Image (tube, rainbow, N blue to C red):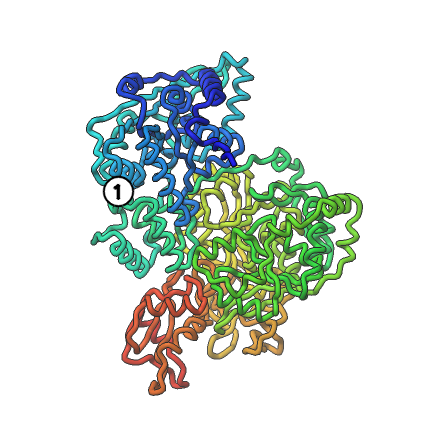
Amino acid sequence: MKKKKQKTSGKARHSFFNTVIALVIKALLRLRYRVTIRGLDDISSRGRKGILFLPSHPALIDPVIMLSVLYRDFGPRSIADEFRMRKRFVNWLSKRFGTRTIPDVARTGGAGADAIMSVLSKSMEDLRNGENILLYPGGHLKRSRSEQIGATSAVQIIANSLPQVRVVLVRQMGLWGSSFSWSSGRSPDFVLALKQNLKNLLRNGIFFSPRRPVEIEFVEPDSFPRDADRITINRFMEDFYNTVADPNTYVPYLFWQDRKISIRPEPELLTTKGEIDSVSETTKKLVVEYLEELTGQRALSEKQSLAYDLGMDSLAIVEIVLWLEKEFGFLQVDTGSLKTVADVMLAAAGKGVSSIPALLKPVSAKWHSRSSANRPLSVSEGKGVCEIFLNQAKRSPDKLVICDQSSGEKTYRDIITAIIALKPFIEALPGVYIGIMLPASVGATICYLASLFAGKTPVMLNWTVGSRNMVHSLNLLGVRHVLTAQALVTRLATQGTNLTEMNDRFVFMETVAKKVSLVSKLRAYAASRLTWSCLRNSNRTDIAVILFTSGSESLPKAVPLSHKNIIANIRDIPSKVVFRENDVMIGILPPFHSFGITTAIVLPLCIGLRTVYHPNPTEAPTIARLIEEYKVSIAVGTPTFLNGIARASSKKQLRTLRAAISGAEKCPASVYQVINERCPHMKLLEGYGVTECSPIVSANTEKAPRPYTIGTPMPSIEHVIIDVNTREKVAENKAGILLVRGPSVFAGYLNYNGKSPFVKYDGRKWYNTGDLVSEDADGVLTFCGRLKRFCKIGGEMISLPAIEEVIAPHFAGDSDEGPVIAVEATSADENPDLVLFTIKDTDRATVNNYLRDAGLGGLHNIRRVIKLDEIPILGTGKTDYLSLKRMM
């Protein structure tokens, strides 16, 4: 059989049709750009084959300009970022001209390394065969007026392997400041910028557009250090490109505007200055030891550059990311955010800031529509989540209420259509419990509601606690199926989470969506517009959601929150913050988080509060862009996530925010400080809650917030503070155990035989929070610490007994008369270090392998090991943890 020629062959790339396309592109570019070429004739006179073209990369439009300039005489094959090639038109054009795509390791991690080397190998073979290659040395758009290549290795690999290859450097000037560049401080979108420029051409009568002057200089330097190391080669190229670093230049787009070209301020660059002080010395030491082992260098400092000082390229930094996720347990977003040793330390402490550019879909005009009255929002009438949701939807069925970048903007009617379509599928799954393992998103919200209307009890699965705790949680309730997404499961697998025991329970929503027939979709569409009886008459359980928590016991406990519990909590919230019709909230907390399920899913749907979801709370620059584009006024998150957003944003991006609600962990002074610097007009409202209380127990009010306190109790919550020892009520401003009772407090754990979480006081039953607080004369509470043996790391509860339970069997012997190990946490407000005390000889690596093998996530890893002659014990025979704390 005769083989069909591929479009990427040399012949196809130089076809008559492609020549016509190149000429058309060149003609169109002339309408907006006045391009001056220097040095190309000299290059051509030396020959037109076997050339490696290495241009600077100021804007997304410059590859198109390079194509128009080089195609006729040189026809180079380009190497491009596959992420940028996803758009249909761009993808088609790149294939026509034989472009080879490589993955961006900042997004794909180590999985992209083999693909990159494969493309480089093919490109070197092309050069040997006399073809020309166009490669951008930096691998990304420049983000300031200077080109920064860092320690990328592509050029070095080619130059060292092909010493005879012709190297032509290309300096492009005049494009920094265009709509295709990063000059605005945000990632440009090629298709959106192209559409806008084409509209401007028409508005200018095609031929009267102001033209941007662009100068392109081609130089084939004899002094190019082709045998040198990558740092030397990259510095040589940077010096060439930055000899003339053009400023942020604005050229008017319309001829009737002022035709004067102007220079604008350079974009603000994100820094991590000042935050390094919040990283523990133990974490810093571990990072330095790892980097020294990886690079072979010694005496590293926090300010050293990974690229320039340590010579690490993007693939080497991928290794750092994988190590960070395995060693410290925090999800690392991308490699681009790791520039210095200090950045690695911050990432190890869960405070890294993503550098991945946010390419956002445009926001509709309907989303930005405003109510002139801007009335306060209120919870609709009804007894449970489902009834209140339907009543709220009936008020304004076509109101946009939730959205994300994947699913788009959804009205109440859209949500109901999706629920009706999905409900039969969930009903058919066996068992009363249905697991949900999805991040904050429109999909997670719909799955949650569809499960309730299908008569199931949603069980929210926390994927950050490791496979051991996840399997226990499912087995505790006999959950047979878990609604999830393939992308999330794949991501967890690459992080090293062993999901083998759960694979047969996963139901991928991507597959479910394909199984919903066209007839089912049409029926759901019709029902959403005619009658909601199938939802109003559905059978529902009394429990609205089941969450999991780790207290002083070693394994997660199942916390059933009834409809009454959650509704009582959301009816209390307006007493602290008044939400209005024009408000928009950003939802980033995962729904397995009690703060997330209540404030980001149930509350918005029950009061009609527009909410924008983003699945990864660590992607701070993207969240900052969402806040700006969707005009978000309310942010809800943990101090760690709010801190990341503030650090990754400009004041302009956060100008619409009026309040940030902080919970899940004590808010440190450093977070108050950075938020005040970035967003001085916004009020930071710190609160306190526990999963068992649905979850908000107390919070500051927007009218009169008291920094560094957790505010006053919610209206429906009764509380009392008792002495740890005497169990008598404490005096004013004295710390004691907080006891609470009220309609938002749960009834008790499921399938649990341990000690009751409730205590008797003054003849009534109270929930014992296990937390120490004090109360002043105004009734304002201040968080003082935890009594139970767990700590919070990255917003997650970490059970110290659970860690001990895994480690102890590996060291206990028949001859041991007392405890051989004990685990305690340092008293740091943010991300405390876990310390192992032991009378045995061991090290961190050994102990952490035991924890990993037991299925505990990286957040449980030991940071320090302290050898003792004996573990101190109390008169009762129990471990004296207070004495151990004093030793740290």
Q: Residue at x 40, y 85 (%)?
A: 877
Q: Residue at x 39, y 34 (%)?
A: 79
Displayed quadrant of residue 693? bottom right
Amino acid at the residue labelled 1: Tyr
Q: Residue at x 24, y 50 (%)?
A: 301
Viewer-side residue, 846 vs 259: 846
**x then y, percent, for residue 409:** 62, 41
Viewer-side residue, 153 vs 333: 153
Relative placement, left or right, of 183 versus 310 is: right
Dividing the image into 4 quarters, which one contains the C terminus? bottom left
Element carrying mark 1: loop
Relative placement, left or right, of 585 versus 343 is: right
Viewer-side residue, 110 vs 621: 110
Q: Is residue 731 above or below residue 574?
A: below
**x then y, percent, for residue 745:** 61, 67
**x then y, percent, for residue 134:** 36, 30
Residue assigned mark 1: 308
> From where the camera sits, is residue 677 visible?
no
**x then y, percent, for residue 65:** 41, 23
Query: Label 1: few (<14), some or many (≥20) within 10 Å?
Result: some
